[in-house]
């Protein structure tokens, strides 16, 4: 098997409530960025989501991975009931969150979860690996061919639990990573795109 680990090259955080929306990019809080997933509570009715992007230049073309893991570093835990949802940004991971408005960031981070799954990893602090199995495989392959980058949206299930925070890449470039595994000798998913004799 071939295993590749790539660092995220963009991260942001959208904070939306009934009367408005504010997006944050880059390090803040004295140089330490904390991107939140979850709700701030019924009184303020804030809903916070995180946007992440990776360049795919180091990945092989037309290859279908068979396992994907997401690494984040939780700096402040959510509650005992916090459930992380990971979804393809914009529905297929190809739209670029950089330059999107706050509302666009928020909405594009709200698509269906990979595998209809949620994860309890942000109930405690520390380095966390989220096993996405092969759910994003076709999105990553297609994004590689179409735009050579891939983006995810993170949120808390139902946006109704206390915030959990993850470390931003401006404070630690390796804080957010994708670990992508390809099967040994795996054939390209679309062999028609590969010249004969090169498979």
Image (tube, rainbow, N blue to C red):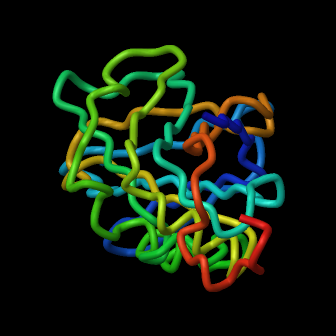
Q: Quadrant of the C terminus?
A: bottom right
116 horizontally vs 155: left or right? left
130 horizontally vs 97: left or right? left
Where does the image place residue 166, in percent across and percent down from the top left?
54, 33
The vertical placement of 123 against 90, above or below, is above
**How many numbered circles are shown?**
0
Where does the image place residue 16, in percent across and percent down from the top left?
42, 65
Q: Quadrant of the N terminus?
A: top right
Residue with the most extreme front position? 197
Q: Nearer the viewer, residue 180 or 152?
A: 180
Where does the image place residue 116, in percent across and percent down from the top left?
20, 55
The image quadrant of residue 120 is: top left
Q: Nearer the viewer, residue 89 or 32?
A: 89
Q: Nearer the viewer, residue 53 or 178?
A: 178
The image quadrant of residue 184 is: top right
Which residue lies at the image location 40% right of the left edge and 35% below the top edge?
131
The vertical placement of 79 against 114, above or below, is above
Which residue lies at the image location 50% right of the left edge and 37% below the top edge?
69
134 horizontally vs 71: left or right? left
51 horizontally vs 198: left or right? left
Where does the image place residue 191, in percent across and percent down from the top left?
60, 77
Which residue lies at the image location 52% right of the left edge and 60% below the top edge?
14
Which residue lies at the image location 24% right of the left edge and 43% below the top edge?
118
The vertical placement of 43 against 90, above or below, is above
């Amino acid at each position: 098997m071939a295993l590749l680990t790539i660092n995220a090259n963009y991260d942001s955080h959208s904070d939306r409530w009934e009367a408005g929306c504010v997006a944050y990019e880059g390090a803040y809080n004295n140089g330490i960025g904390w991107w939140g997933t979850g709700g701030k509570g019924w009184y303020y009715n804030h809903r916070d989501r995180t946007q992440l992007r990776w360049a795919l230049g180091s990945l092989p073309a037309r290859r279908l991975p068979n396992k994907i893991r997401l690494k984040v570093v939780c700096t402040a835990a959510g509650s005992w009931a916090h459930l992380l949802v990971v979804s393809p940004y914009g529905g297929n991971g190809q739209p670029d969150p950089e330059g999107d408005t706050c509302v666009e960031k928020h909405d594009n981070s709200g698509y269906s979860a990979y595998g209809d799954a949620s994860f309890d990893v942000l109930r405690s602090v520390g380095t966390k690996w989220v096993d996405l199995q092969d759910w994003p495989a076709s999105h990553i392959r297609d994004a590689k061919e179409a735009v050579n980058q891939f983006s995810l949206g993170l949120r808390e299930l139902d946006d109704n639990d206390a915030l959990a925070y993850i470390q931003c890449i401006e404070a630690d470039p390796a804080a957010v990573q994708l670990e992508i595994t390809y099967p040994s000798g795996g054939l390209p998913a679309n062999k028609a795109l590969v010249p004969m004799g090169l498979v």
